[in-house]
Image: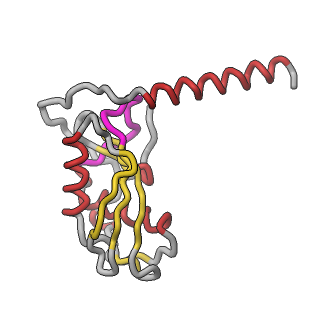
Amino acid sequence: MTSARLTRTLHHSGMWACVASIVAGCTIAPAPPTEPTQTVVTPSTPSSANAISSSNAGTPRDYRRDAATHLYAKYGSRVFAGKLPPQLYAVGVLQVEINGKGAVTGLHWMRAPSHAPEVVAEIERSVRAAAPFPTPLKMGRVTYTDTWLWDKSGQFQLDTLTEGQL
């Protein structure tokens, strides 16, 4: 390996180590703002016209996209438009169990944002209120996992449909 390539490889490794330590240290966050912010929904945000009542997904990973589209259609005004800022208020990984009729039968946090219990409660309330989800026709029932990316404004994106970060 050449000296320049080794230097570049070490630089990239160091960069990713910094990113990992920043993410690991995301337990202290600023308080959420008290004033509501205005939402601008871009054309790339799915609308209620894109909502589907059933899913032909054959795997939980494929179903995740249908569920995310369903949530975006339901909560379009709360979806953060564009790229998210570099520091998020909360990040949570949630498993959602859906039965054959699209009802939510269970929620399990794989990584809850413990510093933001109000976000945990709001995500759970939102997921339950979004039922019925698209019925998983091929699977009968499904448990899927998605990551909630929560901005301090109270808006969110789901990892499945995220526009990325700045």
The residue sitting at the right extreme is 1
Position of 64 relative to 135 (above/below): above
What secondary structure is the stretch in magenta mostly built from?
loop
User: Residue 119 location in percent, x, y?
Assistant: 23, 43
Stretch in magenta: 78-91
User: Residue 87 location in percent, x, y?
Assistant: 38, 29
User: Residue 2 location in percent, x, y?
Assistant: 87, 21
Which quadrant would the N terminus be assigned to in this image?
top right
Which quadrant of the view contains residue 98?
Answer: bottom left
User: Residue 96 location in percent, x, y?
Assistant: 35, 62
Which quadrant would the C terminus be assigned to in this image?
top left
Left or right: 85 in relation to 105: right
State the residue at coordinates (41%, 54%).
146
Position of 28 relative to 72 (above/below): above
Which quadrant of the view contains residue 143?
Answer: bottom left
Which quadrant of the view contains residue 131?
Answer: bottom left
State the residue at coordinates (27%, 69%).
104
Left or right: 14 in relation to 144: right
